[in-house]
Image (cartoon, grey):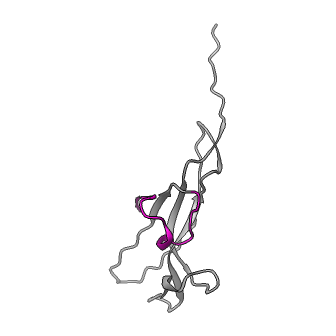
Amino acid sequence: MSERAVAQPYMRPCAANFGIIVNRKFVPVKHNRRDAFQDSHGGEWKARDQIDWLLRKGNVILSGIGTTIMAELNMTFVRDEVTERQVKFLIYMREDAPDAYADLKSGMFVSVGTL
């Protein structure tokens, strides 16, 4: 009878930042004025293209075990309005992950896709 070798998971740092690009309620002390816009549906001021980092570079992850990350997204749909909504996924290689898409360093990010 032979024993099967079971690979033990090991910890390693995440190699990149993984995030989604969203619009947030505009907070003057937190957001840059260049990102501000007035939402056409409710008139609320929002900050465009802010990044929610779901997994940060350097976070400890276990090898061989899936990492599940969940985020709540709220989208407004108006009856009889033809509209397109999308969620943009992003990978950023540097450690200085900014909060706004406009502050990303050129050539250091990959837009993975949309949902």
| Residue located at (62% from left, 17% from top) | 4
Nearer to me, 75 or 105:
105
Q: Can you give x and y, in whole percent of width and height, for residue 75 in the image?
A: 48, 75
**Which stretch appears magenta?**
95-115
Count numbered badges in the picture: 0
Query: Quick one: 4 or 10, which is closer to the camera?
Result: 10
Query: What residue is rendered at 53% in x and 86% in y?
Result: 33
- x 54%, y 56%: residue: 94
- In percent of the image, x 63 and y 19: which residue is there? 5
In the rendering, at what x and y percent does residue 42 appear?
50, 90
Residue 44 placement (x, y as % from top left)? 53, 90
Quadrant housing the N terminus: top right
Q: Within the magenta stretch, is there residue 71?
A: no
Q: Which residue is situated farthest in the bottom direction here?
A: 43
Q: Is residue 49 left or right of residue 12?
A: left
- Residue that protrudes farthest toward the left in the picture: 82
Q: Is residue 75 left or right of residue 1?
A: left
